[in-house]
Image (tube, rainbow, N blue to C red):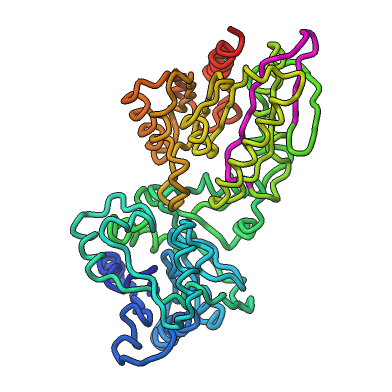
């Protein structure tokens, strides 16, 4: 008989696990849902004064382990959802000998010395916590979300309205100490088996994690260890409320060690983003200066029109090669150079979801430097964005300069995904497109895009249609995200050629 200890996230208590716990019990498991101090736990009942911090919650989970260990026969599986993974990992470090497995349920990866606040995606919420802490109130708390604010803490997709009501009614303020105190780990639990259960509706997937590993993100490299396995649920961030039976099944499978293992990048088989460009392009020499590579036409005299290519992301700062050495961007730059247009690729600093402001400044600076090059016709420039750089297009659509002849986007993410939090009103592309006027827009749309990304594109398209924007859509019906190197098909090749024709037509007329 497996023993499950379930630890919920911020503002919540054991009640969120009711449906899943009942199904686990029906399957023969022993189930304990932990009531954390300050969120319905022991200090609440006693009315005891004092600061509740992360160590308080670690102690709560340790107490649950000690209590369950007296009767546990099949091993203890610790399950941490969202914030709950922090006290879970801390407790596993202190009771490693009693724990059979740790399950990360749509959560981050806690690190020694790092507070839980670092895992909060929403920059505005993080800043609010820090402001409250700066006021010096040791007992300060973060108020729970209102009914309409839960989506800021993760997708509420598939959660019944009645469950949202219940979640809101029973929510408790989160003690700030639980978010600000750094987690302390000795490494005692490093060898424990671990499972990740990812909620696809919240913007997480095994494929996405694998892609991040392929990019070389250092914090994810431990996931290559043989002790890790991953499962997915096709729902939002609250599977215990939206799909309790499916979650129970996933936890039972995880406890048995089932799941998909990630693979290390193979030099003999490069990851998708380093695959070959699908069409033949000329060998145009590049000129490298600081963070920009230029591909300048060799034959025709200048000044030439230019296309500035803006890579997606976030891309880890440690990723090698950097985006301007990726074949897909080099392929596009060489392709336009072969047609008499300067191709420019920049490495910008979109390294995390908090970096959109910084990346926007990098792009603006690079564009002006390209326009200042004497070989470039500064009045004929196009910008071409990819994937996660989609929100950066808002600056250019919202106030298009006269020299901007075209703005293109390939398989873009046009708004913050559910697990991103808020990235700033400045980057609301669906608002900005209303001010685009007659600026030609080219959208290259992948037919097999993930539902979460496709939803952001659909919202943008609806806004573009409502204001009569000059939007030209190139469909790749059987194309995935990054189709140029993922799908080496004639359809992909024709889409690349069609996109090049569409963009260049606005520069050469």
Q: Is residue 255 visible?
A: no
* Residue at image location 53% in from the left, 14% down from the top: 502
* Residue at image location 57% in from the left, 12% down from the top: 501
Query: Residue at the left extreme?
Result: 162
Question: With respect to residue 339, does 156 lie above or below?
Answer: below
Q: Toward which corner of the image does residue 470 lie, by quadrant?
A: top left
Question: With respect to residue 223, does 464 lie above or below?
Answer: above
Quarter of the image where the N terminus is located: bottom left
Seen from the viewer's position, the closer of residues 321 and 224 is 321
Residue 301 inside the magenta-drawn segment: yes
Seen from the viewer's position, the closer of residues 41 and 63 is 41
Question: With respect to residue 205, does 170 lie above or below?
Answer: below
Q: Toward which corner of the image does residue 381 lie, by quadrant?
A: top right
Q: Judge from the rendering whether residue 143 lies leftward or rightward of residue 388; answer left or right.
A: left
Seen from the viewer's position, the closer of residues 311 and 187 is 311
Number of marks in picture? 0
- Residue 219: x and y, percent? 63, 59
Q: Is residue 143 visible?
A: yes
* Residue at image location 52% in from the left, 28% down from the top: 409
- Residue 484: x and y, percent? 58, 26
**Residues shaded magenta:** 293-315
- Residue 222: x and y, percent? 63, 60
Quarter of the image where the C terminus is located: top right
Residue 98 inside the magenta-drawn segment: no
Seen from the viewer's position, the closer of residues 98 and 214 is 214
Q: Judge from the rendering whether residue 299 lies leftward or rightward of residue 432; answer left or right.
A: right
- Residue 218: x and y, percent? 66, 56
Q: Judge from the rendering whether residue 471 lies leftward or rightward of residue 301; answer left or right.
A: left
């Amino acid at each position: 008989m497996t023993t499950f200890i379930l630890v919920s996230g911020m503002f919540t208590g054991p009640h969120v696990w009711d449906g899943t716990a009942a199904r686990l019990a029906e399957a023969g498991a022993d189930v304990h849902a932990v009531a954390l101090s300050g969120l319905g736990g022991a200090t609440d009942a006693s009315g005891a004064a004092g600061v509740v911090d992360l160590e308080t919650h670690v102690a709560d989970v340790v107490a649950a382990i000690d209590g369950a260990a007296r009767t546990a026969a099949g091993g203890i599986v610790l399950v941490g959802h969202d914030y709950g993974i922090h006290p879970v990992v801390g407790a596993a470090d202190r009771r490693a000998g009693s724990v059979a497995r740790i399950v990360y349920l749509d959560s981050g990866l806690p690190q020694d010395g790092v507070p839980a606040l670092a895992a909060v995606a929403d920059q505005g919420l993080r800043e609010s916590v820090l402001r409250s802490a700066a006021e010096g109130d040791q007992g300060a708390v973060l108020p729970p979300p209102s009914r309409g604010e839960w989506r800021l803490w993760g997708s509420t997709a598939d959660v019944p309205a009645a469950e949202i009501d219940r979640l809101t009614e029973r929510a408790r303020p989160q003690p700030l100490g639980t978010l600000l105190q750094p987690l302390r780990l000795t490494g005692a639990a490093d060898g424990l088996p671990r499972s990740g259960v990812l909620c696809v509706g919240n913007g997480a997937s095994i494929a996405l994690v694998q892609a991040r590993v392929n990019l070389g993100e250092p914090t994810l490299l431990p996931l290559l260890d043989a002790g890790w396995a991953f499962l997915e649920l096709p729902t939002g961030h609250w599977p215990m409320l939206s799909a309790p039976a499916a979650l129970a099944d996933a936890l039972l499978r995880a406890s048995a060690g089932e799941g998909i293992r990630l693979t290390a990048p193979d030099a003999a088989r490069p990851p998708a983003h380093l695959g070959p460009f699908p069409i033949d392009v000329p060998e145009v020499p590049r000129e490298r200066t600081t963070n920009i590579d230029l591909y300048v036409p060799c034959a025709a005299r200048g000044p030439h029109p230019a296309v500035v290519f803006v890579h997606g992301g976030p891309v880890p700062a440690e990723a090698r090669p950097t985006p301007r050495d990726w074949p897909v961007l080099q392929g596009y730059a060489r392709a336009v150079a072969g047609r008499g247009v300067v191709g420019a690729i920049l490495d910008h600093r979109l390294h995390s979801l908090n970096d959109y402001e910084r990346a926007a400044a990098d792009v603006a600076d690079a564009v002006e430097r390209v326009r200042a090059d004497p070989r470039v016709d500064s009045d004929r420039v196009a910008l071409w964005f990819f994937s996660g750089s989609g929100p950066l297009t808002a600056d250019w659509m919202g106030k298009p300069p006269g020299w901007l002849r075209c703005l293109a986007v390939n398989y873009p993410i046009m708004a913050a995904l559910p697990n991103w939090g808020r990235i700033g009103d400045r980057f609301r592309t669906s608002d900005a497109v209303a001010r685009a006027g007659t600026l030609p827009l080219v959208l290259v749309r992948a037919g097999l895009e993930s539902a979460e990304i496709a939803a952001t594109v659909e919202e943008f398209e609806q806004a573009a249609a409502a204001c009569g924007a000059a939007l030209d859509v190139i469909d790749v019906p059987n194309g995935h995200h990054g189709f140029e190197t993922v799908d080496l098909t004639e359809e992909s090749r024709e889409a690349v050629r069609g996109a090049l024709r569409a963009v260049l037509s606005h520069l050469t007329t």
